[in-house]
Amino acid sequence: MSEDHYFTAQPASAEERRTITVPLAGRSRPVEVARGIFSPDRIDQGTSVLLQHAPAPPEAGTFLDLGCGWGPIALTLALRSPAATVWAVDVNERALDLARRNAISLGLNGVRATTADDVPAGTTFDLIWSNPPIRVGKAVLHELMRTWLPRLAPGGSAYLVVQRNLGSDSLQKWLVAELGDGYDVSRLTSVKGFRILHVRRGA
């Protein structure tokens, strides 16, 4: 049997759920993880770079964690901005269940963990944070960007963390060409081989 990918909708592997302790929003917190999802043992390095170096989120608004996994980005956004609504989107049903359970265990009522199809049409986002699933391939990645970045609200920002040797610079160039006028695409910073790309929609 082939090994599950984290972008498998229904992982076939045994869950083997367990609790680990990870740093979220400045404190160590217990979260539930399992096999068959992205980075089941820890917060991966790219996500850690994003969490440590992206600007602080607004106090309130509608946010999106695209490719949420078990929830480190969505949970951090909700911890930092309790008044916000945080949509946590993934294809992996096991990951979504974990994100929901982790939000409940941390008392975070603003997190909505769901598949893309269940995000109401017309929802726009003041902030998007994402460690996008590069390994799904360029075509799928580009379609994700085409789908979600135009849903930034006027004046909204997206922060995308991408490993340099997995195509961050080429993605930045593609975003500039694809999004065109009305969006500003820049590199916020580069840390430990990862770039944080900043996409801002004009007001």
Image: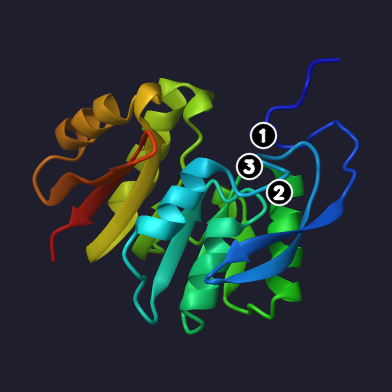
Kind of residue at badge 2: Ala
Per the image, the residue denoted by label 3 is: 91
Q: Which mark is residue 6?
A: 1
Residue 179 placement (x, y as % from top left)? 19, 40
The quarter of the rendered structure image containing the N terminus is top right
Q: CA distance from mark 1 to mark 2?
A: 8 Å
Helix or strand or loop: what does disc 2 sit on? helix
Mark 3 and mark 2 in contact? Answer it, CB < 8 Å.
no
Mark 1 and mark 3 in contact? Answer it, CB < 8 Å.
no
Per the image, the residue denoted by label 2 is: 95
Please tell me whether mark 3 or mark 2 is closer to you in this view. 2
On the picture, is 30 further left or further right than 180? Answer: right
On the picture, is 174 further left or further right than 38? Answer: left
Mark 1 and mark 2 in contact? Answer it, CB < 8 Å.
yes
Helix or strand or loop: what does disc 1 sit on? loop
Question: Could you tell me which residue is drawn at 75 percent across and 56 percent down?
Answer: 97
Question: Could you tell me which residue is drawn at 29 percent across and 50 percent down?
Answer: 150
Viewer can see residue 157: yes
On the picture, is 126 further left or further right than 80? Answer: left
